[in-house]
Image: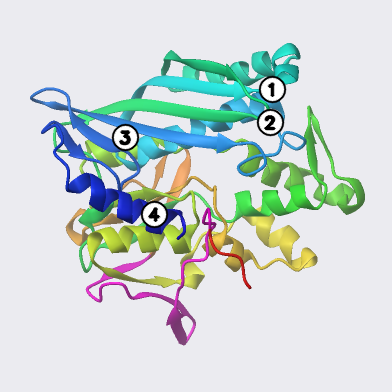
Amino acid sequence: MNEFEFLDRLRRQTDSRRRCSRLLTAVGDDASVIRESANRDLIVTTDLLVEGVDFYTAATPAHLLGHKALAVSLSDIAAMGARPFWTFLSIGMPRERWEDQFKDEFFEGYLTLADRFGVSLSGGDISETKMGIVIDSIVLGEVDSGAAIKRSGARAGDQIFVTGSLGGAAAGLKLIELGARSVPGAIATGPIQNSDDDQSIQSLLRRQLRPDPRVGWGIVLGEQRLATSMIDLSDGLSSDLHHLCKESNAGALIDASLIPRHDDVKRLCGRRALDPLALALHGGEDFELLFTVAPEDLSRLPKRVDGVPVTRIGEITANAGAINIREQNRIWRLEPGGYEHFTALPS
């Protein structure tokens, strides 16, 4: 049983239990929706980051880890079309990390990003661990009543869009695995370094270590009622598109030629036996927004928000569960290829 199978079972268990009538959605979306008042809904999300699984301290400066811990939760709030307001943070760390500069640098990165979006750190908890750092980030936001954008609203004929570009974070992780390290003002890359590549390597490491949540796009799509469904790209396009279509009981056809690939991925990866399309499809942690728009609303969709472009990559179909991709004259089934916790290893 992988994480998504377990979550499906847990949702069935919780749906069969009595719950407060103010809880409008629970397990199954990027965040929960709670009726706050007659005209406002509260959006709540939580994310867990575990050392050795979600990040490596040898490759992640503390201030960038603080930034990322908040960014991943802000991305979930954006995926619901909400405006973020409050955050809670719980963190456990070994004694040696408590006694060095880690905690101060971590919170510097966390609070700098919070200030950027007007989010207030409102509480949390701190504990000592015996092995490794564990971070639990919670963010709360608000939307107008009934305006939260769920994964379940896509309908046949809706056009599929993605913000920004894809594959950069996965390429950054590959570079880290090859020895690339981020240091202030420069990149130390060891044996893979090439002076012509320094700027591109820095850019891709930044995509992995310092993601930029698309808060502005989320607010516009939510407040203008533009998106029929939405999800943030944390597990990878192939996996997250499956999640969205499953909740919407729909299918999809995307065009490989339309998928926006990060320029530095295209420039560097060919020389390192990495396929830019595969990274864009299956690489996670881009934290872009994948959303659908009804045909009648396409003329209202901005081309950019906060300087970030949007690209149409395909269309929702009525063939539930059939997620296909076209490359020139060939069409094939796009299987989910993103990361899954607790996936069985090959025997």
* Magenta residue span: 314-342
Mark 4 vs mark 3: which is more N-terminal? 4
Q: Are marks 1 and 2 in contact (CB under 8 Å)?
A: yes
Q: Which residue is mark 4?
A: 6
**Could you tell me which quadrant the C terminus lies in?**
bottom right
The answer to if 131 sits in the magenta stretch is: no
Q: Quadrant of residue 183?
A: top right
Which element is circle 2 on? loop
Q: Which residue is mark 1?
A: 94
Q: Are marks 1 and 4 in contact (CB under 8 Å)?
A: no
Residue at x 7%, y 24% (from the top left corner): 38
Mark 1 vs mark 2: which is more N-terminal? 1
Q: Which residue is mark 3?
A: 219
**Is the residue 111 above or below the residue 226 in the image?**
above
Mark 3 vs mark 2: which is more N-terminal? 2
Identify residue type, mark 4. Phe
Identify residue type, mark 3. Ile
Which element is circle 1 on? loop
- Residue mark closest to the camera, 3 vs 2: 2
Query: Is residue 312 in sight in this rendering?
Result: no
Residue at x 65%, y 39% (from the top left corner): 55
* Rendered location of residue 152, percent (x, y): 23, 55
